[in-house]
Image (cartoon, rainbow, N blue to C red):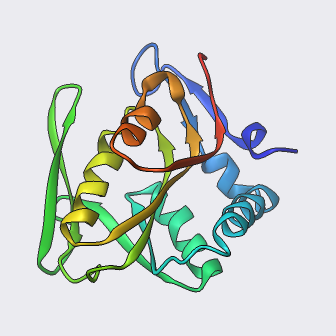
Amino acid sequence: MPIKSRIRTVPHYPKPGIMFRDITTLLKDPTGFRITINELASRYANTKIDIVAGIEARGFIIGAALAYQLGVGFVPIRKQGKLPAATLNQDYSLEYGTDRIEMHIDAISAGDRILLVDDLIATGGTAEAACRLIKRAHGQIVECCFVIDLPDLGGRARLEQQGHTVFALCEFVGD
């Protein structure tokens, strides 16, 4: 059974017209979670990666498990004000206004090869901001990796137009 069938769709959340793709059902399924991490680990097993960077919050779950499996470090990219030491920050646009993500200044060393991970790519704003943070720290982005791609929202294309390679385990098109 593929992982897509283990992802719950919640209609009209967080607002009418949105079909929210909820990976908590995938995460609670031990087989589904194992398949997810093993498929990603297999993809990157022969790729030089120094650090997996995960975007808050579900990117922490997938990213940390993947980093463990690959035998590399993990770096959290968090919402503003959540990290205790000095940070780099990056603003990004939302539908109404802006938000900010942060990463510790010392999280990435110049030349580190980074795999960026999150659960889902939609419009790509958060992932784009994370890529900018990583580049500002002089890290090299190996790939942007997601469990789910929502191609109708253009995030994958947005990242690819900026020269990033993007991978997703599954996609939900048009529904």
81 relative to 60 in the view: left or right = left
79 relative to 127 in the view: left or right = left
| Residue ID at (38%, 42%) | 159
| Res. 37 image quadrant | bottom right
In front of the other: 82 or 37: 37
**Residue 117 image offset from top left, x and y in percent:** 48, 59
**Residue 33 image offset from top left, x and y in percent:** 71, 60
94 relative to 71 in the view: left or right = left
Residue 72 seen in render: yes
21, above or below 61, in the image: above
| Residue ID at (73%, 39%) | 4
| Res. 153 image quadrant | top left
**Residue 108 image offset from top left, x and y in percent:** 29, 79
| Res. 9 image quadrant | top right
| Residue ID at (21%, 83%) | 106
Identify the image quadrant of the N terminus. Answer: top right
77, above or below 73, in the image: above
22, above or below 144, in the image: above
In front of the other: 81 or 42: 42
Residue 122 seen in render: no
